[in-house]
Amino acid sequence: MDIGRRTALETSAWAVGTPGPIGSAPLRRIRREIPEPGPQDLLVQVSVCGVCRTDLHLAEGDLPPRAPQRVPGHEVVGRVLAAGSSVRGFAIGDRVGAAWLACTCGTCRYCRADRENLCPDSRYLGWDLDGGYAGHLLVDARYAYPLPGDRPDEEAAPLLCAGIIGYRALQRAELPQGGRLGVYGFGASAHLTAQLALARGATVHVLTRSAEAQRLALDLGAVSAGPADAAPPEPLDAAILFAPVGDLVPVALAALDRGGTLAVAGIHLSDIPALDYDRELFQERTLRSVTANTRADGRDYLAEVAGLPLRVQVNRYPMDRADQALADLAADRVTGVAVLTIGQ
């Protein structure tokens, strides 16, 4: 299929119409022309796209879409159909991954300091650019990841955001070797990050309201699993807040031992209540946010988990049930990760 003909063909996609509560059906099924790759682009035929809570924030308007009819999705696995003239390192037919970070300026002080996740001109797949809830998409090859074929597409897709962001959150939490980690919320990212921490020798305590998620946490090797607002059985050296619930920030801070760090992993968080300095921040406890990721984070994470028996708890949805996948995510009916199976 040559490029001249490709632009006349269409692909099916889901797009955000009018953002609002998921019950108002903000996602709409649309058809669009298959785009033509620019010099640095890969045209990817999508096989699988992970369903992330960020997609839910986009659909419901917590993250206002950057353009009308924006196509969500940033945990994409597919095959290269065509490549631009300047692309290096990818060939037609290669399996490729596309993630949240889609573009940076490359010249600002953050990019020059290897902190490209803070680039003021950064752009994101499924927010600034159309994402993977579609049969085809364009990806800047410089921000794509080559994927070896030893993990099924459905298991590889969640690694590209849930995994990478959890990896950065774990780094930001500065968990010491053999330390005690608290994980608040136990969805897609948390259940992958907990396994990485366990593989590094940590003791993991999970705090989440879902009884099913608590059972999964224990099955994966957590020492304890209890309600999100409960105290863990021992003080924590570090904690990661995955649940987008600001009320849990003081709870998690209070659970930290002296010198501990809480990393907040979400892109959106409900309001944080007033903090009690003496109880929650004194004794050099630290509160940190996590903002996107660098490409180095992605490469390092994928390399580290390549040799681990990582268990990815997958809930599969066909392409025509993307709206149901988001509704289930909103209602906490997904344990592990949700993925859309789109094509081969």
Image: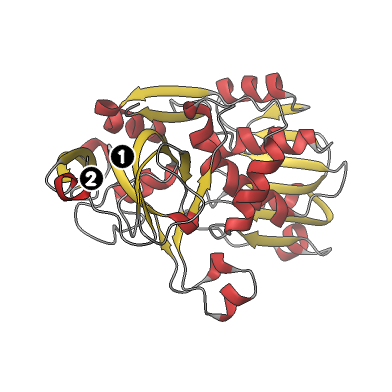
- Position above or below: 296 against 332: below
Q: Is residue 223 left or right of residue 104?
A: right
Q: Is residue 89 left or right of residue 1?
A: right
| Real-space CA distance between mark 1 and mark 2, rounded to the nearest whole angstrom | 8 Å
How many marks overall? 2
Please state which of residues 207 and 126 is positioned toward the viewer in this rendering: 126
Please state which of residues 195 and 32 is positioned toward the viewer in this rendering: 32
Contact (CB < 8 A) between labels 1 and 2?
yes
Please state which of residues 159 and 68 is positioned toward the viewer in this rendering: 159
The mark found on residue 118 in the picture is none
Q: Is residue 275 visible?
A: yes
Q: In the structure shown, which secondary structural element does the residue marked by tag 1 occupy?
A: loop
Q: Position of residue 103 (x, y in %)?
A: 44, 63
Quadrant location of the N terminus in the rendered image: top left
Q: Position of residue 225 (x, y in %)?
A: 69, 27
Tag nearer the camera, 1 or 2: 1
Q: Residue at x 50, y 24 (%)?
A: 314
Q: Residue furthest right?
A: 178
The kind of residue tagged 1 is Tyr
**What crowding class fits label 2: few (fewer than 14 Cα within 10 Å), some (14-19), or many (20 or more)?**
many
Q: In the structure shown, which secondary structural element does the residue marked by tag 2 occupy?
A: strand
Choose top left, top right, bottom left or bottom right for residue 234.
top right
The mark found on residue 133 in the picture is 1
Q: Residue at x 77, y 33 (%)?
A: 198
Quadrant location of the C terminus in the rendered image: top left
Q: Position of residue 339 (x, y in %)?
A: 42, 30
Q: Position of residue 85 (x, y in %)?
A: 36, 59
Q: Residue furthest left?
A: 8
**What crowding class fits label 1: few (fewer than 14 Cα within 10 Å), some (14-19), or many (20 or more)?**
many
Task: Write down the residue under mark 2.
Answer: 15
The kind of residue tagged 2 is Ala
